[in-house]
Structure formats: C-alpha cells, structure tokens
Image: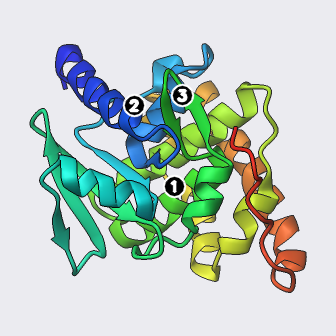
Amino acid sequence: MPDKEFESLLSACSEVAELFPDGIVFIGGIAVYMHATNLEETKEMAEFTHDADFYISLAAMADLRDMEEVTQNRRLSRHQMIKRGFDFDIYTERHSSLIVPYDMVAGYSALYEGIRVASLEHLLVLKLEAFLNRKGSSKGEKDAKDLLRIGAVAARGGQSFRPELAAPFMRDEHLKLLELVYRGPYATSLAQGNAVQSKRLRGEFSDIADGIRENIGCDRTTPPPKAPRHRM
C-alpha cells in the first residue's frame, strides 16, 4: 500500500480514537503496526495494513451508531463501518466472540500518538485465534508474521512479556500454533532470507512460548487477573 494511503488510514483511526479515547482499543494488524513502528529496533519490520479492527465498549458503541453508518455482521459477531474509504471491523463489549474480554483488553492497553491499542500479551492471544482460522492462507501467513513481530517488540523494547496475561486464554490448539510459528517458514520470510535475523526472531518467539507454557499449569486452575482500575 502506498505510504500516503496508509497515512490516510492512520488518520481515520486517529479520528475514531479521538472521539472515544477511553472506549475504543485497536486490535489486529493496525495494533501490531503501532507497537512495532514506535520502537526503533523493530520499526523496519512494521507492515502496513489495508483496514483496521477495534474493540469498543457498549457505551461508546451506542454513541458511534449515532455518528456513523454501522452495519451488523451476525455470522461473524461483529459490526462494520467505512470511514475515508477504509473498512473497519468493530467488536463490541459482551457481544463479540473475541476470547479476551473487553475490560481486560482495555485495562492493559497501550497508547501511541492518541491511538489506544491492545497489549502485546492480548494481541498475541487474538492473533493466535485469527491464525487458527486462517492458517494456510495469505492472511494466515500475515498473522504468523505478526506473532513474530510481537515477540520481537517484547524482546527488544525493554518491556518484559507478561505471560500471565495471555496464559488464561490459551487452549491446546493455540499451544500447537506457537510451535507451528516457531518451526514454520515465517521467520525466514519475515527476515527476507537472512539466517541470522531469522534465528533471532525464532529465539525471541520461543522465549514467549516457553513463558506461556510455564504459566499454563497455575492458570488452568486459577481465574485470570483482573483488569487494572486505571488504564495505561
């Protein structure tokens, strides 16, 4: 996508975020991009996306309906809207099928240039779920690369990945996907064939996977952590 077109998408995201600074959290590719591009060591691997997804509170959704033309997709448990010619997929608190609750995603979210995005830990879970449904397709390949980007940001950004935030939402099929991302061709593709960079990406992702597995035991029998009162 041309830079100017992607800048238009970011502007559209900023407009939406400004209207609901505490009621919308961006997820998906746009959130991975914001994490990656705001870290010098991962800026070059940030990838443009063609659309945007966000998680929205019930209160904000009621207001959004009054401002924008929003359509419902019952089959996919989400709503959609078009802004500046770009497609936005909307997942509503309590009404969507996303496996991480809205209050958790919002409570641990990060803020970049006025755009609130899901934490690396919750993005990992949501990306794994997307990859589960799309592996073997071009979108699935991007999901796998985004998972590797998440690992790189966590390793190179000086912020420790918190596996306890991801572990409660992990199922057996997600754990198998962690292995698939690690052993598959995705790291080599993301590193554009550079063996050294590919090895580094695999190592960073392996560290995240190991941390999650270590937390699975306790998190299978204890409830997920509560969302903090004050958002980041």
Most foreground residue, 108 or 170: 108
Q: Secondary structure at mark 1?
A: loop
Quadrant of the image occupied by residue 134 = bottom left
Q: Is residue 199 visible?
A: no
Mark 1 or mark 2: whose residue is earlier in sequence: 2
Identify the mark at residue 205; answer none if there is no mark.
none
Q: Residue at x 34, y 50 (%)?
A: 53
**Type of the residue with mark 3:** Ala
Q: Residue at x 80, y 66 (%)?
A: 225
**Type of the residue with mark 2:** Glu
Judging by the rendered image, the residue that carries numbered circle 3 is 36
Quadrant of the image occupied by residue 137 = bottom left
Left or right, residue 60 beside residue 206: left
Query: Can you say which quadrant of the picture contains the C terminus?
Result: top right
Left or right, residue 207 beside residue 48: right
Numbered disc in front, either 3 or 1: 3
Judging by the rendered image, the residue that carries numbered circle 2 is 18
Mark 2 or mark 3: whose residue is earlier in sequence: 2
Give x and y (percent) for residue 117. 52, 41
Q: CA distance from mark 3 to mark 1?
A: 22 Å
Circle 2 packing at 10 Å, graded few (<14), some (14-19), many (20+), is some
- CB of mark 1 within 8 Å of CB of mark 2? no
Q: Residue at x 74, y 45 (%)?
A: 230
Judging by the rendered image, the residue that carries numbered circle 1 is 184
Q: Residue at x 46, y 44 (%)?
A: 145
Give x and y (percent) for residue 31. 47, 39
